[in-house]
Amino acid sequence: MREAREPVGFQDFAPVYHPAGFDQELRVVLADVQLGRWLAVRDLLARTGGDWALRTARTQVLAAAAARTDAVEAWLAEEPESGDAVVMRARVAVERTLQAHRAGEATVGVLEREARQACLLAAQRLPSDPVPWVCLLALAQVDVGLQWGEHWRPAWEEMLPAGPWGLLARVGERDQAGNREAFHRMLQFFYACPHTSVADAINFAQWVVSWAPVGSPLRMLPLYAYMESYWRHRQDGTLDPLQHRQWSREPVIHYVRRAFHGWNDRPANGTSVVDLNYLAHALWAGHQYADAAKVFETLDRYATRLPWAYVCEDPSSPEWAVREFVRTRAQCLTTTRTRAAASPKHRLRFI
């Protein structure tokens, strides 16, 4: 296997993996949740208020941690009238269902019904909140047999596949800015449903980009869909040896450039570290090293397992995914700095 080497000066770089990403407030609260404490969760969600993008992101991360504890159950026991606690119960129930589904557990059917009920109760308690509907949309990927009619509705455009469009509409009625997680849940449905394909997911992502405003995280969707296509071909042994070149060719490079155009180089609490990792990879793979370097500089030390695990030497090894991130980052930053040092403008400083 090939060595994953970095240029001189980068050997001591150690990436940081944390579900809170840039959100320092969330980072502190997660430590409490992991110990089964809920007071900090209540206070954080109260401060988050009606910032739907931030609320959606925070509740998703909190649920992943709380699913391994009884923190939300304890919160509900103390404050049964809390709308935020009811929403978090739905979040945790959905997270446990998805985990059981991925593990192939026999309990997934029971968990799915309980989660659905929790989501409907949360939607009733907080009718203006998009999160319960995002939760229902997340459950659609579990329904591979399409037992629920709401998961197979005609698309809004003729060329798009059927799917849980009604649930997406419910989210959109409450979060008109374009809820990032909701659209990613649609992608996941298209990946999982036996009647749709990754090609359908790509078409969906391209359609979203056709109307998503500059700076919207929805412009990142094609990067995920193209990477999923690459990964599936790699898994089933049908990967074209030249498929990695897709990132530098049309139409892929077009969507990479659109994702980069208007991206936020000053990350806020709700900025997705995963999005920026996908963007950095796509730019690097498309030989856009200077732009990739800008994204890596914004990321600082923050890394995510994907997409690097999909493209590294050994996808089953976390160490190889880390090496791929570090190697790619080093190449982009070194290339950019070398070019800057060689430019006439830079040399004039030393005259």
Image (tube, rainbow, N blue to C red):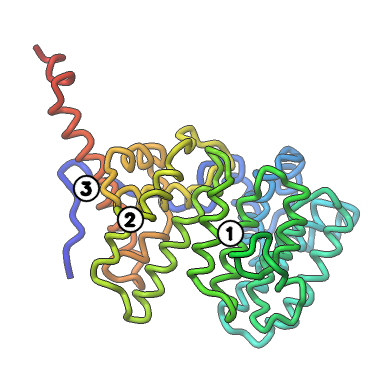
Q: Name the residue rendered at 49%, 50% in the picture.
A: 220
Residue 285, position in %: x, y?
29, 53
Q: Is residue 258 above or below residue 149?
A: above
Question: Hey, what amino acid is under mark 1?
Answer: His
Image quarter of residue 36: bottom right
Q: Is residue 188 above or below residue 75?
A: below
Residue 294, position in %: x, y?
35, 37
Question: Hey, what amino acid is under mark 2?
Answer: Trp
Q: Nearer the viewer, residue 220 or 278?
A: 220
Q: Residue furthest front?
A: 158
Tell me the crowding category of disc 3: few under 14, some 14 to 19, or many 20 or more residues within 10 angstroms, Cα based.
few
Going from N to C along the chain, the mark reached first, 1 or 2, is 1
**Quick one: SS at disc 1?**
helix
Q: What residue did someone put label 1 on? A: 184
Q: Residue furthest top?
A: 351
Marker disc for residue 11: 3
Image quarter of residue 145: bottom right
Q: What residue did someone put label 2 on? A: 247
Quadrant where the image shows the N terminus:
bottom left
Q: Nearer the viewer, residue 162 or 63?
A: 162
Tell me the crowding category of disc 1: few under 14, some 14 to 19, or many 20 or more residues within 10 angstroms, Cα based.
many
Going from N to C along the chain, the mark reached first, 2 or 3, is 3
**Distance Cα–Cα, label 3 vs label 1:** 35 Å
**Distance Cα–Cα, label 2 vs label 3:** 27 Å
* Nearer mark to the viewer, of 2 and 3: 2
Q: Residue furthest bottom?
A: 106
